[in-house]
Amino acid sequence: MNIILLGPPGAGKGTQSARLVEHHGMRQLSTGDMLRAAVKAQTPVGLKAKAVMDAGELVSDEIVSDLIDAELAAMDADTGAIFDGYPRTAVQADILDRLLDKHGRTLDYVIELEVDEDALVKRITGRFSCANCGALYHDTANPPAQEGVCDACGSTEFKRRPDDNEETVRTRMQEYRAKTAPILPGYEARGIVRRVDGMASIDEVTAAIDSIIG
């Protein structure tokens, strides 16, 4: 089983990928994670990517392609792959098709986590974490039991990600729609697109994805 999970930042792709890994033994292929790992390990691709990033440039599709190629080559044939947030463009979609074919794999489903923009803004801008232990909280959905005190470690210091603000979230939504819209028709024509309510509870989203992949 090879699937693509699509959705804007904050839709829950990472959470659902982790559950697919845990429950189905699949492998999450997040290009960002792979890139960081390759740079840290100083692999040939990692060194190439580091040089590009150090120069302040964007990592090319060619480098990302090399990363995915290497990961697929190292995976057991019977281990399913989850492409988390990739591809984002029509060019990347074509690259992924070629790589899957090269490794004798087929793309089974493209699962889009649909979200309501206003609700997503509230979800993301309300996030914060303990500055000491990293425990995650939310202003309304998951506040600490005692206001201002971390449930896990008792710290009174909290922090928010600087990009967890309304302007950034709405900009990301616009970028997601602009980049994703061109790649979906091709997958729709193949009959492999499925949509899940990304604003449902984590467990409900997991159940919906499980019902799709079987």
Image (cartoon, rainbow, N blue to C red):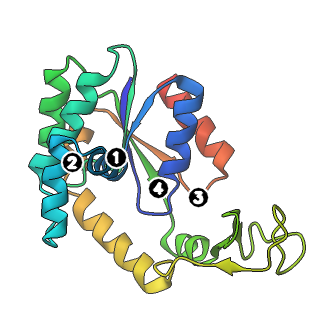
Q: In the rendered image, which residue does mark 2 sit on? A: 46
| Image spot of residue 153 (x, y percent) | 82, 64
| 70 sits left or right of 77 in the view | left
Of the residues under marks 4 and 1, which one precedes in the sequence?
1
Q: In this rendering, which labeled residue sits more in front, label 3 or label 2? A: 2
- Dot label at residue 199: 3
Q: Tell me the crowding category of disc 1: few under 14, some 14 to 19, or many 20 or more residues within 10 angstroms, Cα based.
A: few
Of the residues under marks 3 and 2, which one precedes in the sequence?
2
Of the residues under marks 3 and 4, which one precedes in the sequence?
4
Q: Amino acid at mark 3?
A: Met
Q: Are marks 3 and 4 in contact (CB under 8 Å)?
A: yes
How many marks the image carries: the answer is: 4
Quarter the N terminus occupies = top left
Q: Amino acid at mark 4?
A: Glu
Q: Tell me the crowding category of disc 2: few under 14, some 14 to 19, or many 20 or more residues within 10 angstroms, Cα based.
A: many
Q: In the rendered image, which residue does mark 4 sit on? A: 114
Q: Are marks 1 and 2 in contact (CB under 8 Å)?
A: yes
Of the residues under marks 1 and 2, which one precedes in the sequence?
1
Q: In the rendered image, which residue does mark 1 sit on? A: 37
Above or below 209: residue 148: below
Above or below 112: residue 72: above
Extreme bottom residue here? 167
| Image spot of residue 198 (x, y percent) | 54, 54
Give the residue drawn at x 25%, y 58%: 181
Q: In this rendering, which labeled residue sits more in front, label 3 or label 1? A: 1
Q: Tell me the crowding category of disc 3: few under 14, some 14 to 19, or many 20 or more residues within 10 angstroms, Cα based.
A: some
Whole-Å distance between the Cαs marked 3 and 2? 36 Å
| 109 sits left or right of 70 in the view | right
